[in-house]
Amino acid sequence: MSHLALPVLKNGQAVALADLSELPFAFFRDTVLGAVRQGLRLACLCADAQLRMFAVLADDAGRTLRVARTRLEQPRYAALTPECPQAHLFEREMAEQYGLQPEGHPWLKPLRFQKSWIGGEASPQPTPGALDFYRVEGDEVHEVAVGPVHAGVIEPGHFRFQCHGEQVFHLEIALGYQHRGVEQALEGGPHPLSLKQAETAAGDTSIAHTWAHCRILEGLAGFSVPARADRVRGVALELERAANHVGDLGALSGDVGFLPTASFCGRIRGDWLNLSAEGCGSRLGRNWLRPGGLQQDLDPRLAERMLPRVDRAWVETRDAVELLWGAASVMIRFEAAGHLGPAQAREIGAVGVPARACGIPMDVRRDHPFGPYETHPAVPALAESGNVHSRAWVRWRELFESHRLISEALADLAASPCDPKPTSLPKLAADSLCVSLTEGWRGEVLHLAVTDGEGRFVRYKIVDASFHNWFGLALALRGEQISDFPLCNKSFNLSYCGHDL
Amino acid sequence: MSQPLLSTALNLLLHALAVLLLPPLIPGLIAKVKARMAGRTGPPVLQLYYDLAKLSRKEAVFSRTTTWIFLAGPVGTVAAVLVASLMVPFGHTPAPISFEGDVILFAYLLGLARFLTVLSALDTGSAFEGMGAAREVTFSALAEPALFFGFAALAKATGSLSLAPMLVGHGLTPQAQGMGTAAHLSGPLILILAGWSIVYLAENARIPVDDPNTHLELTMIHEVMVLDHSGRPFALVLYGASLKLVVLGALLVDLLLPRLAHGWMNWLMFLAGLGGLALAVGLVESMTARFRMTKVPQFLLAGVLASAFAFLLLLV
């Protein structure tokens, strides 16, 4: 059967499970594989304790989402990964969480070193990093192990390189050190703490995750957010993007030892963060959004005060980053490292900055518009080469777009009065499923919720852009110099906790 | 007779004091220049003195995989560079030790220092440190010829194999050759300076060859070799690195300094020269990114060629 028979879903729209017929597994598998062959993206594949399996297929060109579900008879099934590498991490995740054995999976290893979710207290707690790493044998081949404790103050992750001299043959990445059990904590919700948990799924992507979570609740409750609140959310998301992109460009510059941009951007990132703090009291955008609207509305006078500060930060950002593009010694470094081509990026389902850096025009803000982006579209920034330079360039072009969107939104907000305080949401729809996507600064953020007969979450799935992209980093290192790894790593700048949840 | 003896003793004392006390100032100056260029306040110029004082009161931690070689590395390195420093004249003040052929001893003492650092890095058995050691010896194998060709050129110019006459009495400046004062530098001198400047950046692990400030183990060259040192041995490592900045810096500065009437003026001139060098290094580090590691050999080769051409020019 073709994926065209699957129900069409819009971003953030709830669907009753009754309207989502349960396919036999063989049908489900063929449909998903057929859809991926036709260019759809496997945005999410997850299971729940009742051996139900859900797949979200994103048709970016067709601007739709399609959802398929199935129920397994027994905890084993024919793996999708051999024909669809995008499923690789999802299947490892399901094997770890629910003991679902993907038969024929070529790379079945622990993913987050978490305890089985169905085994109860008796199930063993795996040791993080205790993994059968891929090894290259040979006289002059050596292995370099980095992390999980690094020389800088960064998140923990373990990197195992197989090297021949300075050249990397293979890199394997083992994560899971930051696993906190966010998805499990959200089950049975929404609890009073759920919003906080979604907010901190990836601490530097608060707004994107909170917004996705809010839209899940709003979709399940059938509530539509006032347009002004959506504009404010847009400002929050773009401020988050601007601060992180500025920080990344500075850090990229620092990694090649180019001081001017590194130092300036370090400070200017603070200016962008302070604008978020102006809006909600937190530099990381905490406590800004809430289901149904905003925790803190943006006063018209405040919006007016923020406008000149945005412009000043933008002028300084441009001055600092243009130094980078003007330095030949930096350009040589950026262009020589970390190539990830469009074919590989598509195959592994890369999203966000790394995908756009190799010319794949994909941006949730345009493809599956949400909130203000339906009326105020964002143009995706593209580059072609798929190397460090391209990823830096995409960030740079996105800053232009973010600045434009922030300025326009603030100008409109300055001219419109605040909404009345939102009331609490109506009850969530029972036995339903909702998928919500947002475009965080790293890329696509997906939240998926399935409710039970009382409208409580029986399964809450979070997919950060990092989850799709970590494998891209490993591929980008193939055949590269090991000394270029930090630069490549920074050009992806993926989230450890967003992956580990 | 007593007058020259007194001044010799005084110079010896000053030389020893300069070698022991001056070096930590240079990294501080470079860091200050870099910070100012980046619009930051930066750490105090005396930061390295504070760091050394702090480290000297800290206990060293030794890994179980290491042997006595691990400790011999920093101790031996500093000892070798200290002895080498006695053969270098600081400006036009004569060097405490000077004899025919001391240039060979000087070069090999520096080689010994590197050898000991590399050994102590390998002694840790860490993949990082082994990688750093491999990089260090690869790059220094290319930097050494540049140093030696420079020495050969100066030996040809002066007919001496002693550092003091070679560095300060090379007679390569146009004034010395009676060619007037219009040009301050002659061809061979420019080439030696160019070649040795590259050696200076490479040997002292500065940008564009290495990045002394990076915290990224995989890109380090020199820093990664000393990652496992702590406490007093680490203080020695830091002091040794700054001493190398002074000793190799003296080679560069000596080539350019004019002789002045009084001893104290020569001393001041030399100190000003070192300060200028720190400023130059800071400026280079502020304006360029680090090379990709595969490009470093080409950069070092440029240094070898420059020195080699200086030698060729003096041969004909």
Image (cartoon, coloured by chain):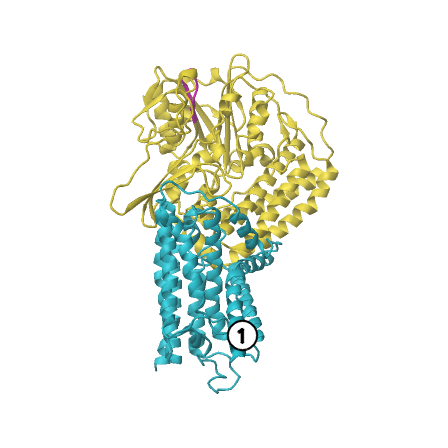
Q: Quadrant of the C terminus of chain B?
A: bottom left
User: Which chain does the cyan colour mark?
Assistant: B
Residue range in magenta is A45-55
**Residue A296 falls in which quadrant of the image?**
top right
| Residue A325, placed above or below residue B251 | above
Chain A on-screen colour: yellow
| Residue A25, placed above or below residue B316 | above
| Residue A463, placed above or below residue B118 | above
Q: Is residue B60 visible?
A: yes
Q: Nearer the viewer, residue A14 or B219?
A: B219
Viewed as shown, does residue A409 lie left or right of A395?
right
Q: Position of residue A165 (x, y in %)?
A: 32, 50
Q: Nearer the viewer, residue A351 or A129?
A: A129
Residue at left offset 59%, top offset 32%:
A371
Q: Secondary structure at mark 1?
A: helix
Q: Which chain hosts label 1?
A: B
The residue singled out by tag 1 in the image is: B6
Q: Position of residue A146 (x, y in %)?
A: 40, 41
